[in-house]
Image (tube, grey):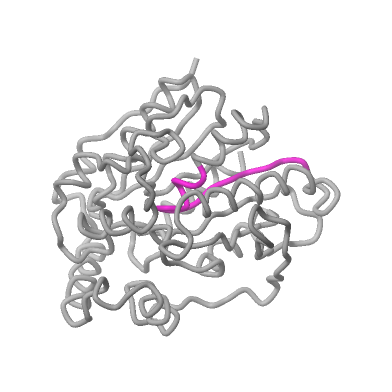
Amino acid sequence: MSRPISIDPAAFAEDAVPEGTRDYNRKLMAQARMAPDTWSLGPAEVRARRTRGLSPFIVEPKSERAETIEIPGPRGPVPLRVIAPENPTAVYLQFHGGGWTLGTVDQDDPRLERLASELGFACVSVDYRLAPEHPYPAGPDDCEAAALWVVREAAARFGTERLLIGGESAGAHLTAVTLVRLRDRHGLTPFARANLTAGSYDMGLTPSARRFGNPALVLNTRDIRMFAANFLQNGEKLDDPDVSPLYADLKGLPPAIFTVGTNDALIDDTLFMAARWIAAGNEAELQVLPGSAHVFTSLPEPNARPAYDRVMAFLKG
Protein backbone atom coordinates (compact mmCIF):
# COMPACT_ATOMS: atom_id res chain seq x y z
CA MET A 1 0.00 0.00 0.00
CA SER A 2 1.23 3.51 -0.81
CA ARG A 3 2.55 5.71 1.97
CA PRO A 4 0.08 8.58 2.51
CA ILE A 5 1.01 12.16 1.73
CA SER A 6 -0.03 15.08 3.89
CA ILE A 7 -0.48 18.81 3.41
CA ASP A 8 0.69 20.92 6.33
CA PRO A 9 -1.62 23.96 6.79
CA ALA A 10 1.33 25.79 8.34
CA ALA A 11 2.96 26.04 4.91
CA PHE A 12 0.19 28.42 3.84
CA ALA A 13 0.52 30.76 6.82
CA GLU A 14 1.83 34.23 6.02
CA ASP A 15 4.36 34.09 8.86
CA ALA A 16 5.85 30.88 7.41
CA VAL A 17 7.23 32.72 4.37
CA PRO A 18 10.99 33.34 4.64
CA GLU A 19 11.78 37.04 4.49
CA GLY A 20 14.16 36.41 1.61
CA THR A 21 11.36 34.75 -0.36
CA ARG A 22 9.06 37.67 0.36
CA ASP A 23 11.73 40.12 -0.79
CA TYR A 24 12.44 38.14 -3.94
CA ASN A 25 8.76 38.05 -4.88
CA ARG A 26 8.59 41.84 -4.53
CA LYS A 27 11.66 42.11 -6.74
CA LEU A 28 10.07 39.89 -9.39
CA MET A 29 6.93 42.02 -9.51
CA ALA A 30 8.92 45.26 -9.63
CA GLN A 31 10.99 43.97 -12.54
CA ALA A 32 7.84 42.94 -14.38
CA ARG A 33 6.35 46.43 -14.01
CA MET A 34 9.38 47.86 -15.80
CA ALA A 35 9.39 45.28 -18.60
CA PRO A 36 7.31 45.23 -21.80
CA ASP A 37 4.24 43.03 -21.92
CA THR A 38 5.47 39.56 -22.81
CA TRP A 39 2.49 38.77 -24.98
CA SER A 40 2.94 41.90 -27.09
CA LEU A 41 6.44 40.79 -28.15
CA GLY A 42 5.85 37.36 -29.66
CA PRO A 43 7.61 34.09 -28.74
CA ALA A 44 10.76 34.69 -30.79
CA GLU A 45 11.51 38.03 -29.12
CA VAL A 46 10.72 36.67 -25.65
CA ARG A 47 13.13 33.79 -26.26
CA ALA A 48 15.81 36.26 -27.35
CA ARG A 49 15.24 38.43 -24.27
CA ARG A 50 15.53 35.40 -22.02
CA THR A 51 18.84 34.49 -23.66
CA ARG A 52 20.10 38.00 -22.86
CA GLY A 53 18.96 37.70 -19.24
CA LEU A 54 16.01 40.07 -19.64
CA SER A 55 13.56 37.93 -17.64
CA PRO A 56 13.08 36.67 -14.06
CA PHE A 57 15.30 33.74 -14.99
CA ILE A 58 18.94 34.68 -14.69
CA VAL A 59 21.34 33.44 -17.34
CA GLU A 60 23.05 30.68 -15.41
CA PRO A 61 26.47 29.17 -16.10
CA LYS A 62 26.42 26.51 -18.78
CA SER A 63 28.02 23.14 -18.27
CA GLU A 64 31.48 22.92 -19.77
CA ARG A 65 31.22 19.16 -20.23
CA ALA A 66 27.83 19.09 -21.94
CA GLU A 67 27.68 17.58 -25.40
CA THR A 68 24.89 17.57 -27.96
CA ILE A 69 23.84 14.47 -29.82
CA GLU A 70 20.93 13.87 -32.16
CA ILE A 71 18.52 10.96 -32.22
CA PRO A 72 15.83 10.07 -34.76
CA GLY A 73 12.51 11.73 -34.01
CA PRO A 74 8.99 11.60 -35.44
CA ARG A 75 9.61 14.63 -37.69
CA GLY A 76 13.37 14.71 -37.97
CA PRO A 77 16.30 14.67 -35.52
CA VAL A 78 15.74 15.50 -31.84
CA PRO A 79 18.78 17.12 -30.17
CA LEU A 80 19.74 15.91 -26.71
CA ARG A 81 22.08 17.73 -24.33
CA VAL A 82 24.10 15.23 -22.31
CA ILE A 83 25.98 15.96 -19.08
CA ALA A 84 27.61 12.73 -17.94
CA PRO A 85 30.31 11.78 -15.43
CA GLU A 86 32.47 8.71 -15.77
CA ASN A 87 30.70 5.49 -14.78
CA PRO A 88 27.21 6.92 -14.21
CA THR A 89 25.02 5.44 -11.48
CA ALA A 90 21.76 6.31 -13.29
CA VAL A 91 20.39 8.17 -16.30
CA TYR A 92 18.14 11.16 -15.60
CA LEU A 93 15.93 12.23 -18.52
CA GLN A 94 14.98 15.92 -18.20
CA PHE A 95 12.30 17.97 -19.96
CA HIS A 96 12.75 21.74 -19.58
CA GLY A 97 9.91 24.14 -18.75
CA GLY A 98 8.63 27.23 -20.53
CA GLY A 99 4.95 26.72 -21.26
CA TRP A 100 5.69 24.50 -24.28
CA THR A 101 6.61 27.83 -25.93
CA LEU A 102 9.77 29.13 -24.24
CA GLY A 103 12.75 27.62 -22.48
CA THR A 104 15.98 26.08 -23.72
CA VAL A 105 17.65 22.73 -23.44
CA ASP A 106 20.54 24.22 -21.44
CA GLN A 107 18.53 26.28 -18.93
CA ASP A 108 18.74 23.60 -16.23
CA ASP A 109 22.49 23.02 -16.53
CA PRO A 110 23.34 24.07 -12.94
CA ARG A 111 20.88 21.62 -11.39
CA LEU A 112 21.82 18.86 -13.82
CA GLU A 113 25.50 19.49 -13.03
CA ARG A 114 24.69 18.87 -9.36
CA LEU A 115 23.02 15.57 -10.25
CA ALA A 116 26.03 14.59 -12.35
CA SER A 117 28.71 15.72 -9.88
CA GLU A 118 27.10 14.80 -6.56
CA LEU A 119 25.04 11.73 -7.48
CA GLY A 120 26.88 10.44 -10.55
CA PHE A 121 23.87 10.71 -12.87
CA ALA A 122 24.15 10.97 -16.63
CA CYS A 123 21.70 13.78 -17.41
CA VAL A 124 19.94 13.92 -20.77
CA SER A 125 17.93 17.07 -21.53
CA VAL A 126 15.58 17.07 -24.52
CA ASP A 127 15.46 19.91 -27.05
CA TYR A 128 11.85 19.21 -28.00
CA ARG A 129 9.97 21.30 -30.57
CA LEU A 130 8.21 24.39 -29.22
CA ALA A 131 4.81 25.93 -29.84
CA PRO A 132 3.27 27.90 -31.43
CA GLU A 133 5.44 26.96 -34.42
CA HIS A 134 5.09 23.28 -33.47
CA PRO A 135 1.85 22.75 -31.52
CA TYR A 136 0.61 19.56 -29.88
CA PRO A 137 1.52 16.76 -30.33
CA ALA A 138 5.01 17.83 -31.51
CA GLY A 139 6.61 18.37 -28.10
CA PRO A 140 5.17 15.24 -26.47
CA ASP A 141 6.13 13.19 -29.55
CA ASP A 142 9.76 14.32 -29.27
CA CYS A 143 9.81 13.55 -25.56
CA GLU A 144 8.38 10.09 -26.17
CA ALA A 145 11.07 9.46 -28.79
CA ALA A 146 13.78 10.57 -26.35
CA ALA A 147 12.44 8.32 -23.61
CA LEU A 148 12.40 5.31 -25.94
CA TRP A 149 15.99 6.10 -26.97
CA VAL A 150 17.09 6.21 -23.32
CA VAL A 151 15.38 2.88 -22.65
CA ARG A 152 17.17 1.31 -25.62
CA GLU A 153 20.58 2.92 -25.25
CA ALA A 154 21.19 3.55 -21.54
CA ALA A 155 23.00 0.32 -20.77
CA ALA A 156 25.28 0.41 -23.81
CA ARG A 157 26.00 4.14 -23.77
CA PHE A 158 26.08 4.89 -20.04
CA GLY A 159 26.64 1.50 -18.43
CA THR A 160 23.54 1.62 -16.23
CA GLU A 161 19.93 0.50 -16.50
CA ARG A 162 18.63 2.65 -13.65
CA LEU A 163 16.44 5.29 -15.29
CA LEU A 164 14.94 8.46 -13.77
CA ILE A 165 12.79 11.16 -15.33
CA GLY A 166 11.56 14.65 -14.51
CA GLY A 167 10.95 18.28 -15.32
CA GLU A 168 9.55 21.62 -14.16
CA SER A 169 6.29 23.28 -15.23
CA ALA A 170 5.60 22.23 -18.84
CA GLY A 171 8.46 19.78 -18.34
CA ALA A 172 6.55 18.12 -15.49
CA HIS A 173 3.49 17.90 -17.74
CA LEU A 174 5.62 16.28 -20.45
CA THR A 175 7.06 13.88 -17.88
CA ALA A 176 3.61 12.66 -16.85
CA VAL A 177 2.45 12.40 -20.48
CA THR A 178 5.58 10.46 -21.44
CA LEU A 179 5.21 7.98 -18.58
CA VAL A 180 1.61 7.25 -19.57
CA ARG A 181 2.51 6.96 -23.26
CA LEU A 182 5.32 4.49 -22.57
CA ARG A 183 2.99 2.32 -20.51
CA ASP A 184 0.00 2.45 -22.86
CA ARG A 185 1.68 2.57 -26.28
CA HIS A 186 4.75 0.41 -25.64
CA GLY A 187 4.01 -1.69 -22.55
CA LEU A 188 6.98 -0.09 -20.78
CA THR A 189 7.38 1.16 -17.22
CA PRO A 190 11.17 1.58 -17.21
CA PHE A 191 11.69 4.61 -14.98
CA ALA A 192 12.46 3.99 -11.32
CA ARG A 193 11.52 7.47 -10.03
CA ALA A 194 10.02 10.72 -11.29
CA ASN A 195 10.56 14.36 -10.34
CA LEU A 196 7.49 16.53 -10.98
CA THR A 197 8.00 20.20 -10.08
CA ALA A 198 5.21 22.79 -10.43
CA GLY A 199 3.54 20.98 -13.30
CA SER A 200 0.54 21.98 -15.39
CA TYR A 201 -1.73 18.95 -15.57
CA ASP A 202 -5.17 20.32 -16.49
CA MET A 203 -5.52 22.42 -19.64
CA GLY A 204 -9.03 23.36 -18.53
CA LEU A 205 -7.34 25.11 -15.56
CA THR A 206 -7.62 24.07 -11.95
CA PRO A 207 -9.21 26.48 -9.44
CA SER A 208 -5.89 28.00 -8.36
CA ALA A 209 -4.91 28.63 -11.98
CA ARG A 210 -8.26 30.31 -12.69
CA ARG A 211 -8.34 32.38 -9.52
CA PHE A 212 -4.71 33.48 -9.34
CA GLY A 213 -5.34 36.56 -11.44
CA ASN A 214 -2.56 38.46 -13.15
CA PRO A 215 0.10 39.46 -10.63
CA ALA A 216 3.49 39.38 -12.35
CA LEU A 217 4.92 36.53 -10.28
CA VAL A 218 6.62 34.37 -12.95
CA LEU A 219 3.34 32.79 -14.09
CA ASN A 220 -0.24 34.04 -13.82
CA THR A 221 -3.69 33.17 -15.14
CA ARG A 222 -3.26 35.06 -18.39
CA ASP A 223 0.08 33.37 -19.04
CA ILE A 224 -1.39 29.92 -18.48
CA ARG A 225 -4.21 30.59 -20.92
CA MET A 226 -1.83 31.99 -23.54
CA PHE A 227 0.62 29.11 -23.22
CA ALA A 228 -2.24 26.61 -23.55
CA ALA A 229 -3.50 28.44 -26.66
CA ASN A 230 -0.02 28.19 -28.21
CA PHE A 231 0.22 24.49 -27.38
CA LEU A 232 -3.29 23.43 -28.41
CA GLN A 233 -4.29 24.76 -31.82
CA ASN A 234 -6.46 22.05 -33.35
CA GLY A 235 -9.50 21.75 -31.13
CA GLU A 236 -8.07 19.14 -28.78
CA LYS A 237 -10.35 18.10 -25.95
CA LEU A 238 -9.11 19.64 -22.71
CA ASP A 239 -9.87 16.48 -20.73
CA ASP A 240 -7.97 14.21 -23.15
CA PRO A 241 -5.46 12.42 -20.88
CA ASP A 242 -2.69 12.97 -23.44
CA VAL A 243 -3.37 16.72 -23.17
CA SER A 244 -4.30 16.95 -19.49
CA PRO A 245 -2.63 14.05 -17.66
CA LEU A 246 -4.63 14.80 -14.50
CA TYR A 247 -7.38 12.81 -16.26
CA ALA A 248 -5.17 9.84 -17.13
CA ASP A 249 -5.20 6.36 -15.65
CA LEU A 250 -2.11 6.66 -13.45
CA LYS A 251 -1.79 3.05 -12.33
CA GLY A 252 1.61 1.43 -12.43
CA LEU A 253 3.66 4.62 -12.59
CA PRO A 254 6.89 5.09 -10.64
CA PRO A 255 7.34 6.72 -7.24
CA ALA A 256 7.31 10.49 -7.70
CA ILE A 257 8.23 13.62 -5.79
CA PHE A 258 5.93 16.62 -6.27
CA THR A 259 7.23 20.11 -5.47
CA VAL A 260 5.37 23.44 -5.54
CA GLY A 261 5.31 26.84 -3.81
CA THR A 262 2.24 28.33 -2.17
CA ASN A 263 2.49 31.43 -4.42
CA ASP A 264 2.27 29.36 -7.59
CA ALA A 265 -0.82 29.64 -9.80
CA LEU A 266 -0.44 25.92 -10.46
CA ILE A 267 -0.48 24.80 -6.84
CA ASP A 268 -3.77 22.95 -7.27
CA ASP A 269 -2.32 21.07 -10.24
CA THR A 270 0.37 19.65 -7.97
CA LEU A 271 -1.94 18.96 -5.02
CA PHE A 272 -4.52 17.24 -7.23
CA MET A 273 -1.96 15.24 -9.22
CA ALA A 274 -0.11 14.06 -6.12
CA ALA A 275 -3.42 12.87 -4.64
CA ARG A 276 -4.37 11.05 -7.84
CA TRP A 277 -0.89 9.50 -8.01
CA ILE A 278 -1.38 8.02 -4.54
CA ALA A 279 -4.98 7.01 -5.26
CA ALA A 280 -3.73 5.00 -8.24
CA GLY A 281 -1.56 2.95 -5.90
CA ASN A 282 1.77 4.66 -6.61
CA GLU A 283 4.31 6.01 -4.13
CA ALA A 284 4.64 9.79 -3.81
CA GLU A 285 6.24 12.52 -1.76
CA LEU A 286 4.92 16.08 -1.63
CA GLN A 287 6.75 19.25 -0.60
CA VAL A 288 4.94 22.58 -0.45
CA LEU A 289 7.20 25.59 0.14
CA PRO A 290 5.80 28.69 1.88
CA GLY A 291 5.54 31.80 -0.29
CA SER A 292 7.49 30.49 -3.25
CA ALA A 293 6.52 31.40 -6.80
CA HIS A 294 6.34 29.22 -9.89
CA VAL A 295 9.44 27.07 -10.60
CA PHE A 296 11.18 28.62 -7.60
CA THR A 297 13.78 25.85 -7.63
CA SER A 298 15.28 27.67 -10.63
CA LEU A 299 15.29 31.04 -8.85
CA PRO A 300 17.75 32.55 -6.34
CA GLU A 301 15.45 32.50 -3.32
CA PRO A 302 15.80 30.80 0.10
CA ASN A 303 13.46 27.86 -0.46
CA ALA A 304 15.16 26.75 -3.67
CA ARG A 305 18.23 24.97 -2.30
CA PRO A 306 16.54 22.89 0.43
CA ALA A 307 13.72 21.94 -1.94
CA TYR A 308 16.15 20.73 -4.60
CA ASP A 309 18.23 18.94 -1.96
CA ARG A 310 15.12 16.92 -1.11
CA VAL A 311 14.52 16.19 -4.80
CA MET A 312 18.09 14.92 -5.10
CA ALA A 313 17.71 12.72 -2.03
CA PHE A 314 14.51 11.26 -3.48
CA LEU A 315 16.08 10.55 -6.87
CA LYS A 316 19.10 8.96 -5.23
CA GLY A 317 16.72 6.53 -3.48
User: Percent from the top left, x then y, of residue 47?
Assistant: 41, 75
Residue drawn at 58 percent across, 63 percent down:
127
Vertical arrangement, residue 238 with respect to residue 264, above or below = above
Specify the segment rendered in magenta: 161-175
Q: Quarter-wise, where is residue 280 in the image?
A: top left
Residue drawn at 56 percent across, 69 percent down:
106
User: Percent from the top left, x then y, of residue 32?
Assistant: 21, 75
User: Percent from the top left, x then y, of residue 150?
Assistant: 72, 48
Residue nearer the viewer, 234 or 5: 234
Q: Quarter-wise, where is residue 97 in the image?
A: bottom left
Q: Is residue 165 magenta?
A: yes
Residue drawn at 70 percent across, 73 percent down:
65
On screen, residue 228 versus residue 192, left or right, reads left
Residue nearer the viewer, 301 or 196: 196
Vertical arrangement, residue 124 with respect to residue 185, above or below = below
Residue drawn at 22 percent across, 80 percent down:
36
Q: Residue furthest front?
A: 234
User: Percent from the top left, x then y, of residue 166?
Assistant: 53, 48
Query: Which quadrant of the figure contains the C terminus?
Result: top right
Q: Residue furthest bottom?
A: 52
On screen, residue 69 versus residue 127, left or right, reads right
